């Protein structure tokens, strides 16, 4: 097998703009790739097998190293109304002009994975996955979703201008109140995950925090 033809074909296959990028993608030394490209030779079977072995090792390394990538962790939520006032946003980058928030939103719109909402103490509230739609869209949907499990004990106070009476004159009950995540979450984390791992990563997190989070469904590992 001609070494230059092999390098050229691999450059096309791996969309490599140069030999340095190709060597990093394959797990081969740059000097070897350069020599094979600039000084064509016939490769022995042993050399071809060695290339296959190194590419396999590099693929395993990449899978272990980059299959889960943190995007943002414990990022503070600044609840804001959507433009039409129909739902809540995690923050309003459009109005605030916050470049960092704009970039976070754009990044989350372009990737998929898992996310976690936390309360004001940093305790996990809810864990979800974004597989059918982007992380931003899925997180925003979950942020506004009503769930019967999301209840805490509160007092329902009037919001009209009827004046104030102390509780000993007008007692009000402390009752379980159904809330949205928008009412409870103070922080979120988001992780980009390879598509075929999203279900299992979500299942792992949900099962690890089974007694701490609001998730009703205990996710199963994909067999």
Image (spheres, helix red, strand yellow):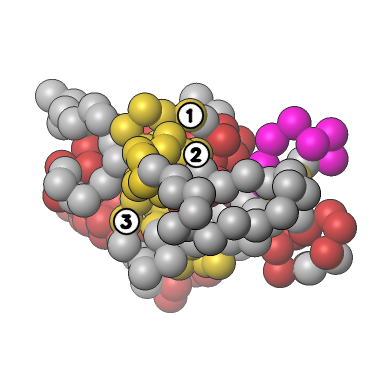
- In the displayed orientation, state which residue is furthest to the front: 169
**Where, by quadrant of the figure, is residue 64 drawn?**
bottom left
Mark 1 residue element: strand
Magenta region: 83-89
Q: CA distance from mark 3 to mark 1?
A: 18 Å
Does residue 150 show up?
yes
Locate residue 45, reporting x and y percent. Answer: 21, 46
* Residue carrying label 2: 180
Mark 1 or 2 closer to N-term?
Answer: 1
Mark 2 or 3 closer to N-term?
Answer: 3
Mark 2 residue element: strand
Q: Which numbered mark, 3 or 1, is in the foreground of this view?
A: 1
The residue at 57%/35% (across/down) is 144
Locate residue 112, reporting x and y percent. Answer: 49, 40
Q: Do the residues under discs 1 and 2 have CB atoms within 8 angstroms?
A: yes
Mark 3 residue element: strand
The residue at 30%/41% (across/down) is 214
Vertical arrangement, residue 143 with respect to residue 117, above or below: above
Labelled disc at residue 166? none
Is the N terminus in the top left, top right, bottom left or bottom right quadrant? Answer: top left
Magenta span contains residue 182: no
The residue at 77%/41% (across/down) is 82
């Amino acid at each position: 097998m001609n070494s230059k033809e092999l390098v050229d074909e691999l450059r096309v296959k791996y969309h490599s703009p140069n030999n340095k990028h190709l060597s990093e993608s394959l797990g081969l030394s740059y000097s070897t790739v350069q020599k094979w490209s600039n000084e064509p030779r016939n490769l022995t079977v042993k050399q071809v097998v060695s290339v296959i072995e190194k590419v396999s090792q590099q693929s395993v390394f990449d899978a272990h190293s980059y299959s889960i990538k943190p995007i943002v962790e414990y990022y503070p939520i600044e609840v804001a109304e959507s433009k039409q006032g129909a739902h809540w946003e995690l923050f309003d980058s459009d109005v605030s002009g916050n470049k960092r928030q704009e970039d976070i939103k754009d990044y989350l719109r372009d990737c998929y994975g898992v996310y976690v909402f936390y309360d004001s103490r940093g305790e996990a509230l809810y864990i979800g996955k974004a597989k059918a739609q982007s992380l931003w869209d899925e997180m925003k949907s979950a942020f506004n979703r009503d769930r019967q499990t999301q209840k805490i004990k509160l007092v329902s106070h009037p919001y009209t201008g009827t004046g104030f009476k102390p509780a000993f004159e007008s007692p009000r009950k402390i009752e379980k109140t159904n809330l949205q995540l928008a009412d409870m979450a103070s922080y979120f984390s988001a992780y980009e995950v390879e598509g075929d791992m999203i279900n299992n990563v979500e299942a792992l997190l949900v099962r690890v925090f089974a007694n701490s989070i609001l998730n009703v469904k205990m996710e199963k590992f994909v067999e």
